[in-house]
Amino acid sequence: MKRSFKIIVFSLLLISSWNILHAQKAFEHHINRLALEVSENGALLYRNNTVLYPTWPYDSRYFNFSSKKMYIESWGVWLGARNFMGVGDTTSKDAFVACGNLYLNTNDIVPLSLQKRIRYPYPSVRVYDGRGQIKAETFDNASLVPSLICDEQIESVWTTTLGITVQLKTYAYAIEGHKNYVVFEYRFINTGNIDNNVQTKELKNQLKDVWFGFPFSTDIKPRFGGTEADDNYEYYGSNYDEWIKGNKTADSTRVLIAWDGNNVDTDSYDPDPITMEPRVPGFYGLGILHADKQAIDDLESGSSDDPKQPVNVDNSSGLESSASAQIQKLSQGGNKNFAGYGVQDFLMSFGPYNIPVNEDVRIVLVQVIDGIDREKAEDLGMKLLSGTITKTQYEAEVATGRDSLFNSLSAAKLAFKKRFNIPDPPPSPDSIFVTSSMGNIKIEWSASSEQAIDPDTKKKDFWGYRLYRAAISPDNKWEMIYEMGGNSGNPIVHSYIDSNVVVGFNYYYAVTAFDDGKDNYIHPGQSLESSRLTSTAYVGASSAVEPQNTNEGFKSNLRVVPNPYNIRSINYGDPNNPSDVQNNKLLFVGLPKRCTIRIFTVSGDLVKTIYHDSGLGSEEWNQVTDSNQFIVSGLYLAHVESDLGNEIIKFVVIR
């Protein structure tokens, strides 16, 4: 029985955490490639731009808002009970509480606690700009729990006027193969409590004919701004119970997937209008890992899983109506081979359950987004632009992301089977220091990873470090620029000087640690690497250039970077956002300490005058004229006037 476990854990948890944690309204997951938010009441409200909806691929914790790849626009939890007797009721009635999706029954919900836990401490990350300023990376208010069985967990607890207290625990991993999903473990407990005093029981009856639903809305697109009701969707699992019985032709999994439409629109997977790479190549999936058969089942036993759940998987309006109508939506059935095109609203529901006081129902879901990687997306865009592949071939390649989604779903199933405890990499270094210098950037880190003890084997299994870099913006592609230890042949060191940089542009760095894979009991010999997302200096570092002091040096070193400037190949940020300063940056380098730069068209029209007096040897320009307009594609001349002499340089802009 579960009763003693729940009473002890929940009493201690809720009483101790209420006063401390209630002020926090939401926490974000940002340790793997699926970024999402968990609120104090289980809700992501529709088109509320203040929250972080599930986005992918989450390659940095500081997504540029306009470049987010959106997959869900709302998420919620519905609770319904028939023949319910509430406080003061003299007759039974249908009762319903909505925790999110399109609306919240705020008068029926009492948040109790919200906290975020991490297995390893966030590193101390500092960036020295070379001019006397040190900037530090900041992290959220997470609790360090070394015994945590996953890398990152958010726990939210709230109670309702039904006397049902909801405990949600999420599990996120930074391990390769497990980076594209987050597990949601719900426990719906009949505590009888309807307020923030967790020691009271205002309701003391068994709840009968109880239903739980998970409504959500998809709108798969690269950014906010209007709806695109053009998504494909499909549900697997209508005969999952037959597969359990041994029918291998039946569905082996329970998952609803959705992806960008390709039936009637001409822009499947939202190709970028400039690069033609698919901007939303991912496939979204909501899968079921476990659903209790009844409320008195053993919490930890897989034998309690009910293969007939969910009862209902369908498209259903999230708009509010009467309690009876909402319960009808939950209980109407519809668990069929469900597929279609264009719909946005979905509902997955479980029930009916009878829940005695102090018993609970456990439902474990997993949200997955996976697809082709960034490099393949870029390659497909180039091939489509050059005509080496057809649009049909392009779409077929992007569609292989469906297989990737099912691979991640299998990994989530494995983690659940292992009770969330899977092999662990060593942690990233606990301290990173980046220094901007003349012509280079120095990265230093601590040796803490080398002393870390594997939580499973209780042994040190560190093998080496990898250093990663992104240019211009942390949203851009990350590349490994150096490896030491392992099979690299390079000795273990704790610093690296990056001289392959363009002066004046920002660079972002991350240091990870990896093991030898010998103790990987799931995939023996496969090395495991720590998460780059928890070891990144998101404060940009840029190298400076010494100013020229002689006419000869000025004459031989003056140049424009990049030249030519081609927005299609540079792609510093979002190429469709011309107001992005970083995206449009040009640099004049090899300058004296002070000079005047006048930029002309080839026909002699003056477009911009820049007065350079920073004392450095470089000056940046965002391609905006003195009349506050962007320049157009073409050949330009820059006339540089200084005490060292005058020089003219040509450069080309392709926009």
Image (spheres, rainbow, N blue to C red):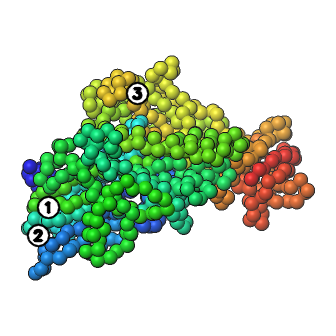
Which of discs 2 and 1 lies nearer the camera? The answer is: 1
| Disc with the residue nearer the chain's start (2 vs 1) | 2
| Helix, strand or loop status at disc 1 | strand
Sequence order check: which comes first, mark 3 or mark 2?
2
Q: Residue at x 80, y 47 (%)?
A: 652
Residue, disc 3: 527
Image coords of residue 301 (percent x, y): 17, 43
Mark 3 or mark 2, whichever is nearer to me: 2
- Label 3: few (<14), some (14–19) or many (≥20) C-alpha neighbours in 10 Å: some
Q: Is residue 408 left or right of residue 77?
A: right
Q: Residues within 10 Å of mark 2 (few under 14, many from 20)?
A: many
The residue positioned 89% from the left and 53% from the top of the image is 602
Q: Which mark is residue 354?
A: 1
Given the image, on which type of amino acid does mark 1 rest? Asn
Q: Which residue is mark 2?
A: 203
Q: Visible in this render: residue 569?
A: no
